[in-house]
Image: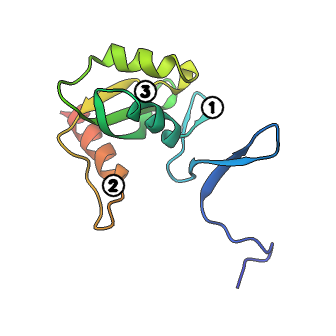
C-alpha cells in the first residue's frame, strides 16, 4: 500500500530543466547542506571521474563549524595522485564554487557492500576518526 498521499518515496532527488525533463541528481540521504545550500555528491563525483588522475571517487559531507557541512572527496588515483589544488580547480571550472570539495583524501580502495555500493558512512567515520587524533 502506498502512503496516504499516493506516492511511493524512493529517496531519489531530481531536478527539472527548462524543457521539462527530469534528471536524477542523487539520493536524499547522500545530500549535504553547506552554508544553507543543497549539494549533491553524485554531481561532484561525476565531474571528478572525468579527471585523468581519478579512477574511483566518493564524496560525502562531514561536519564543519562554519558551513554546517563540507564536502570531502575520497578517491582512488589512476597512477600518481593529483595535487588537491588541481582537483579543486578542475571541479570549480565545471561546477559552482560552493560545490568544490574542501578536502581530497587519497585511498587505496573505496569500501563497498556485497552489491558494490560504496559505504559512505564508513568513509565519513574514517575521516572524522583521523581528525580526532
Counting residues from the start of the chain, the first of labels 3 and 1 encountered is: 1
For the N terminus, the quadrant is bottom right
Asked where in the image residue 86 lies, by quadrant, the reply is top left
Mark 1 and mark 2 in contact? Answer it, CB < 8 Å.
Answer: no
Packing grade of label 2 (10 A; few <14, some 14-19, many >=20) is few
Residue 109 against residue 68 in the figure, above or below: below
Q: Nearer the viewer, mark 3 or mark 1?
A: 3
Q: Nearer the viewer, mark 1 or mark 2?
A: 2
Q: Secondary structure at mark 2?
A: loop
Mark 3 and mark 1 in contact? Answer it, CB < 8 Å.
Answer: no
Q: Which disc, if any, is residue 101?
A: 3
Q: Secondary structure at mark 1?
A: loop
Render colour scheme: rainbow
Q: Is residue 16 left or right of residue 125?
A: right
Disc 1 from disc 2: Cα separation: 25 Å
Q: Give the image location of residue 43, x and y in percent.
A: 53, 37
Q: Give the image location of residue 102, x and y in percent.
A: 40, 23
Q: Give the image location of residue 129, x and y in percent.
A: 23, 41
Picture residue at 24% right of the left edge, 43% below the top: 126
Q: Is residue 42 left or right of residue 51?
A: right
Picture residue at 33% right of the left edge, 66% below the top: 115
Counting residues from the start of the chain, the first of labels 2 and 3 encountered is: 3
Query: Foreground residue, 26 or 23?
Result: 23
Q: Which residue is mark 1?
A: 36
Q: Which residue is mark 2?
A: 119
Counting residues from the start of the chain, the first of labels 1 and 2 encountered is: 1
Packing grade of label 3 (10 A; few <14, some 14-19, many >=20) is many
Amino acid at each position: 500500500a502506498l502512503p496516504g498521499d499516493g506516492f511511493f518515496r524512493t529517496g531519489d532527488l531530481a531536478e527539472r530543466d527548462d524543457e521539462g525533463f527530469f534528471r536524477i541528481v542523487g539520493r536524499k540521504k547522500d545530500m549535504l547542506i553547506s552554508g544553507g545550500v543543497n549539494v549533491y555528491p553524485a554531481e561532484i563525483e561525476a565531474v571528478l571521474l572525468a579527471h585523468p588522475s581519478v579512477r574511483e571517487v566518493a564524496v560525502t559531507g562531514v561536519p564543519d563549524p562554519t558551513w554546517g557541512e563540507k564536502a570531502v572527496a575520497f578517491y582512488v588515483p589512476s597512477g600518481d595522485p593529483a595535487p588537491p589544488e588541481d582537483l579543486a580547480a578542475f571541479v570549480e571550472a565545471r561546477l559552482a564554487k560552493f560545490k568544490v570539495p574542501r578536502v581530497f583524501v587519497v585511498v587505496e580502495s573505496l569500501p563497498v557492500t556485497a552489491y558494490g555500493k560504496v559505504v559512505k558512512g564508513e568513509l565519513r567515520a574514517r575521516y572524522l576518526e583521523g581528525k580526532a587524533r
